[in-house]
Structures are given as C-alpha cells and as structure tokens.
Image: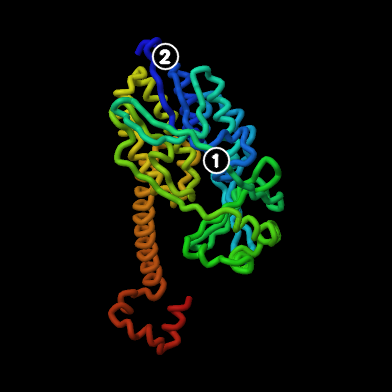
C-alpha cells in the first residue's frame, strides 16, 4: 500500500490503557492518523488515579512487544526482577519456588507508571491525538463512524503499600484453597498487595473485627507487615471488583474493526499473562501488517485466525503454571497441546515404571525365596503361615 494512502487513513483507538496506548505507538510508526479515546482523565495529570493500583508481571512476550517500539529498556529499568515465587504457608513457613534457571525472571512493574509511559510515548508521534474523558457511546463500523461523549468526573482513590519487610525479588503468595493473597514489589521499597476471594466469603467481612479475625486465621504473618489499622482502613476503602473472563468467536469485523487485549480475551489473573497477551496482540498485528503490506482487509481476518486459538488457550492456561509461556513466545494453544501431551507421557511413564517395578519385585521375591520358587506358588499357604523356621528364614533374608 502506498505511504500517501496510509497517511490518509484514520484509526480510532478506543481505550487508552496499556494495550490501547501501545497499539497507538505501533500504528503511528506506520504513519496512520490516530485518535485515542479514553473514558478516564489523563492519569499523568490526575491528583488520584481511579481503578487498579496494582502491579503486573512483565514477561518475555510483553518485553518483545515493547522492544519493537523502542520502549523495552525504559520499562525494564523501572521494574523489579522476581526470580521465584515465595509461598507463605498457614504456619508462617516460607518456601521459594524458582520460575526457571538463575538467569530467568519476570519483572514486577507498576500498572499506573507503565500506562503513563506508554501514553507519553504515543503522544510523541505527531499523528497521535489523545482525547481523555471521552467515552464511546455508539459505533457503526460499516460506515467507519463512532460517537463519543465528554465526561466530567470527580475521582478519589488511595494506594495501598507495604514497606519492605519481605524479600524483594519474589512474587509473594499466600495460597489458601478458595482464596489467596499476593504481594509484588515496587521500586519505592514497598509492596502492592491483592486479595482474591469469592464474593460470599467477602460478604462475611462486615466489621473491623471480622477483617482482623479473618487475617489472623488465614494470613497471620501478614498482619505485622501491614499493621491492623492500615489493614482495616484499606480493606474497606474500595468495593470489591469482580474478575471476568472473555472469549470471542471473532476478533474483527470486515476490514473496519478489530478487538485487542482485554476487549478480546480478558482472563483471570492467576497466571500473570493478561498484559503480556495483550502486548503480544499488538506485536502479532504489526507482524501481519508487514506480511500483508498494510492491507487491513487481509490483516484483520488473519489476526482473528491466528489469535483466537491462542486467546482461548491462555484462558485455560491461566490456572496452570507453565514455564514455556513465561520465558518463550511459543503460541499459547501449542502450550496447551504440550501440556496435554506431557500429562499423557507422565501417565504412560508411571504405568511403565510401575509395571517394571512389579515385575522386578516378583522376580527378586521368587529368586530369593527358594531354589524352587514355584513350589511356593503351588502351595502359598505354606509360606504365608510361616509354620517352620526354615520358611521364616527364607522370607526374611
């Protein structure tokens, strides 16, 4: 496609979050004219940031996407390496579980700061315009028309931090069956904690004493780190937010519209690949634009075909710890296939090993019991009853 034609193409990016701002960078490098619409106010100038004040785990997939737009070094320099999980048992015992080899690690990054950096990077392109406090009301992809409204809102939010009283280069996890708590390190020598639990359990915690009793029962070693006063204050500060999972049968509509990131495949956070999968969407889309010479009529259908099986797979993989997903760019659906294959190999291997042990044990038993081993098989009650010292000696030697 001719570059002058590309310059006349306008693209509306709905959502100025992590994936939207990164995708704006990718498209700007191709000389598209881009308008980014974000319902929230600009987080770089807001007194308080509404939404998730959480940390995220940046792995190889996400770093490759950032590298493609020249942002990897900047973002990595602001992250803290996490080389292992630190599991906190109910008794207070801590056990480190490495992610891989000593050279392998994932990075704890601030979602808020990462979003600010991506927005700033996108705005550096003259073809990118940001429209904050603008919410999408209506979309007509066939005509290429969208309707947005201007929003005025007051935002109130407080961050929840813990000063370093734990090892910083770990993802700290308190697994407790149906619920769990995690803590990721920050550059400011603090931790950001997140508690995951069913709503029916959450609804039982009504008073300050309920919260303290709950933590004393399930997270006793966390109370001295947080402090009872701050724990109660922050627990009731914001309402609980539900976790959602999204699976779409198609990510595109003709050559006019495409879904990326959480809009296409929101997943539960237990595998730490939501942001990385969204960033990889941007990278894969950019690779397809190269392949099809910027022809959106070919790129968008190919994107759906390529990413749908992967997005469905990562939704399933989010409940499992699969090393290849964190430290390579193997496609997610292939990782699921490998996982199922490994299970079959393990089960067959255990069956073979068990059979081998049984055969070996039978041989040794028969070999050492008597020069005439089949004599005892013909008359098993003789040696079971152990009615002679000779038989006792033969069995025990």
Q: Is residue 120 above or below residue 264?
A: above
Mark nearer the viewer, 1 or 2: 1
> For residue 7, which numbered disc appears in the image?
2
Viewer-proximal residue, 176 or 210? Answer: 210
Residues packed near mark 1 inside 10 Å, few (<14), some (14 to 19) or many (20 plus): few
> For residue 365, which numbered disc appears in the image?
none
Q: Is residue 159 above or below residue 260?
A: below
State the image coordinates of residue 141 (x, y, percent, origin top left): 32, 29
State the image coordinates of residue 344 (x, y, percent, origin top left): 34, 52
| Viewport quadrant of the N terminus | top left
> For residue 153, which numbered disc appears in the image?
1
The answer to whether residue 38 is left or right of residue 11 is right
The answer to whether residue 325 is left or right of residue 75 is left
Identify the residue at image location x=60%, y=68%: 210
* Residue 165 seen in the figure: yes
State the image coordinates of residue 314 (x, y, percent, origin top left): 40, 44
The answer to whether residue 113 is left or right of residue 271 is right
Identify the residue at image location x=45%, y=34%: 149
Q: Secondary structure at mark 1?
A: loop
First in sequence: mark 1 vs mark 2: 2
Viewer-proximal residue, 13 or 294? Answer: 13
Q: Secondary structure at mark 2?
A: helix
Identify the residue at image location x=51%, y=34%: 133
Label pair 1/2, CB-CB below 8 angstroms: no
* Residue 101 seen in the figure: no
The answer to whether residue 98 is left or right of residue 295 is right
Give the distance between the C-alpha atoms of the residues marked 1 and 2, in whole angstroms: 35 Å
Residues packed near mark 2 inside 10 Å, few (<14), some (14 to 19) or many (20 plus): some
């Amino acid at each position: 496609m001719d570059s002058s034609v590309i310059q006349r193409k306008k693209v509306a990016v709905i959502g100025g979050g992590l994936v939207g701002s990164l995708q704006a960078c990718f498209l700007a490098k191709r000389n598209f004219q881009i308008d980014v619409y974000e319902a929230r106010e600009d987080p770089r100038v807001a007194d308080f940031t509404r939404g998730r004040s959480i940390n995220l785990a940046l792995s190889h997939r996400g770093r490759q996407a950032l590298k493609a737009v020249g942002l990897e070094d900047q973002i990595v320099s602001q992250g803290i390496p996490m080389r292992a999980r630190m599991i906190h048992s109910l008794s207070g015992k801590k056990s480190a579980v490495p992610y891989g080899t000593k050279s392998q690690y994932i990075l704890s990054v601030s979602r808020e700061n990462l979003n600010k950096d991506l927005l700033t990077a996108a705005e550096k392109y003259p073809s990118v315009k940001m429209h904050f406090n603008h919410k999408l009301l209506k979309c007509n992809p066939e005509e290429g028309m969208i309707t947005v409204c201007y929003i005025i809102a007051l935002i109130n939010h407080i961050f929840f931090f813990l000063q370093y009283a734990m090892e910083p280069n770990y993802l700290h996890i308190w697994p407790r069956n149906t619920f769990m708590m995690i803590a990721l390190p920050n550059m400011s020598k603090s931790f950001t904690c997140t508690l995951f639990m069913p709503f029916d359990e959450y609804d039982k915690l009504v008073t300050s004493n309920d919260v303290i009793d709950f933590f004393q029962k399930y997270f006793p070693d966390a109370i001295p780190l947080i402090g009872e006063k701050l724990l109660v204050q922050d627990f009731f500060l914001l309402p609980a937010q539900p976790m959602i999972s999204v699976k779409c049968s198609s990510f595109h509509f003709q050559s006019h519209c495409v879904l990326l990131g959480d809009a296409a495949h929101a997943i539960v956070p237990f595998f730490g690949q939501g942001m990385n999968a969204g960033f990889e969407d941007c990278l894969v889309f950019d690779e397809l634009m190269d392949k099809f010479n910027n022809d959106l009529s070919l790129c968008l259908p190919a994107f759906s075909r390529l990413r749908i099986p992967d997005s469905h797979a990562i939704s399933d993989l989010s409940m499992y710890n699969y090393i290849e997903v964190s430290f390579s760019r193997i496609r997610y659906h292939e990782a699921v296939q490998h996982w199922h294959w490994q299970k079959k190999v393990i089960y067959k291997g255990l069956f073979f090993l068990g059979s081998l042990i049984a055969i070996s044990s039978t041989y040794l038993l028969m070999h050492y019991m008597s020069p005439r081993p089949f004599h005892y098989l013909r008359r098993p009650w003789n040696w079971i009853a152990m009615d002679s010292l000779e038989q006792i000696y033969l069995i025990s030697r």
